[in-house]
Amino acid sequence: MLIGLTYDLRAEYLAAGYSEDETAEFDRPDTIDAIEKALRALGHSTDRIGHARQLVRRMAADNRWDLVFNIAEGMYGLGREAQVPAILDVYRIPYTFSDPLVMSVCLHKGLTKLVVRDAGVPTPDFAVVQQPEDADAVNLPLPLFAKPVAEGTGKGVCPTSKITDRRLLGSVCRELLARYRQPVLVETFCPGREFTVGITGTGAEAKVLGTLEIILRPEAEADVYSYVNKENCEELVEYRAVSGATDDEVRQAEATSLQAWQALGCRDAGRVDLRSDRGGRPNFLEVNPLAGLHPQHSDLPMIATAVGMPYVELIDRIVRSAACRAHCGTSLRDGNLASSSEASRSAESA
C-alpha cells in the first residue's frame, strides 16, 4: 500500500513562534522516522504529508493514498483532532484511528464522561466550569481535581490542580480559563492507584494490550500526573507493568477500559487512563484515541514493549485494523488492496 503520514511536528511550530506549552502535544521527528521505518519494514510505501493545511494543499494537487496513517493533533479548537479525519472522509480515503465524531467527543473530557457514565462505566462525579462564577456552584466533596477540558500531555495539570480547600477552587478555575481559553473540568479526586491501559482493535475486535501502573517517584510533583512529571518522566515516574491475571484491581481497570473504549466507538489503538477511588475501584478518567507513538517515550509503545510486542508489530496491528474497514478480507501483504485513490476519483466523477 501507499501510506501517507499526517502529523504535527513540534519543531516546525516552535520555529514559527509558538510556545513550548502550545506545542506540547506535537511530535518529534524521530517519532515520524520510527513510524515510517516500521511501515516500510512491513512492505508499504510511504509519503510524508504533514499537518492539516499541508494535507489540503496535497489534496488540491490531486494527490491520493491507499491509507493515511494519521497522528495529527491540530492546533486550534475543541475539534482540532477531528480536522484531518474530516478532510479524508470527504474524499473517502481510509485512515488510522478514530473518526471525526469520536475524536471531538473524546477530546472534550466532560462529554466523554457523560457518554461512559451513561454506559455504566465508573467515573468520578464532575462539573464543567464554563466561566469563573460557575465555580461557586460546584457541589462536589473535597478533594477536587481541576484541569482544562480539552488538553492532553498533562497541559494545565500541576500541584494546584488538586484542591483541598474549597476557597481555592475559584482562583484555580480562573487561572485555567484565562490561560487555555476553554472550560475547566472539575471532578472528585481519586486517591488510589493510577493506571494506563493500552487497547488495540475496533468494536467487538478490540482487546486489552496491557497495563502500566503510574508510580510517582519521591522527587516528582506529588499526587498529580502533571505536565512536569510527564515531560521528565524518565527521572520522575516509574512505569510498572502489571497484569489483570494476577491483580484483581488491574483486572477491573482493564475491563473498565475495554467497556469505555467500545462505548465511545474508538478505533485501531489507543489508551485509557484510570485512577482508583478510596475503595480500590478503578475509575475512568479519560481516553486517548490518538495516543503518542514514540517507540521509547510514549505510553502505548511502552505497554507493547512490556508485553513483548515489537514496535513494528504494534504499527502493523494498527494498519490492519484501519485497512479492514475499507478492505476487510483482503491480504495487506499480497498487494491486492484496491486503490482508495481510484475509489475516490470514481466518486468525484459520479
Image: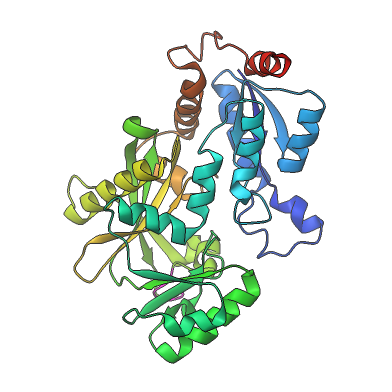
Question: Residue at (68%, 46%) from the top-left corner?
Answer: 8
State the extent of the magenta-drawn residues as a range: 220-224
Is residue 115 highlighted in magenta? no
Image check: 320 left or right of 244?
A: right
Question: Residue at (51%, 27%) from the top-left corner?
Answer: 319
Q: Is residue 13 above or below residue 59?
A: below
How is the rendered protein coloured? rainbow
Image check: 191 left or right of 129?
A: left
Q: Quadrant of the N terminus?
A: top right
Task: Point out residue 253 in the picture as x, y percentages from the top left corner.
Answer: 27, 53
Q: Nearer the viewer, residue 160 or 210?
A: 160
Please tell me in which quadrant of the rendered image residue 72 appears: top right
Q: Is residue 20 above or below residue 242?
A: below
- Quick check: can you spot residue 220? no
The residue most toward the front is: 350
Task: Point out residue 229 in the picture as x, y percentages from the top left corner.
Answer: 50, 67
Task: Point out residue 189 in the picture as x, y percentages from the top left corner.
Answer: 35, 73
Image check: 105 left or right of 259?
A: right
Please tell me in which quadrant of the rendered image residue 266 appears: top left
Question: Residue at (60%, 55%) from the top-left corner?
Answer: 25
Magenta stretch secondary structure, dominant: loop
Task: Point out residue 79 in the picture as x, y percentages from the top left corner.
Answer: 60, 51
The residue most toward the bottom is: 167
Please tell me in which quadrant of the rendered image residue 156 appears: bottom right
Q: Is residue 90 above or below residue 98?
A: above
- Quick check: can you spot residue 207? yes
Q: Quadrant of the C terminus?
A: top right
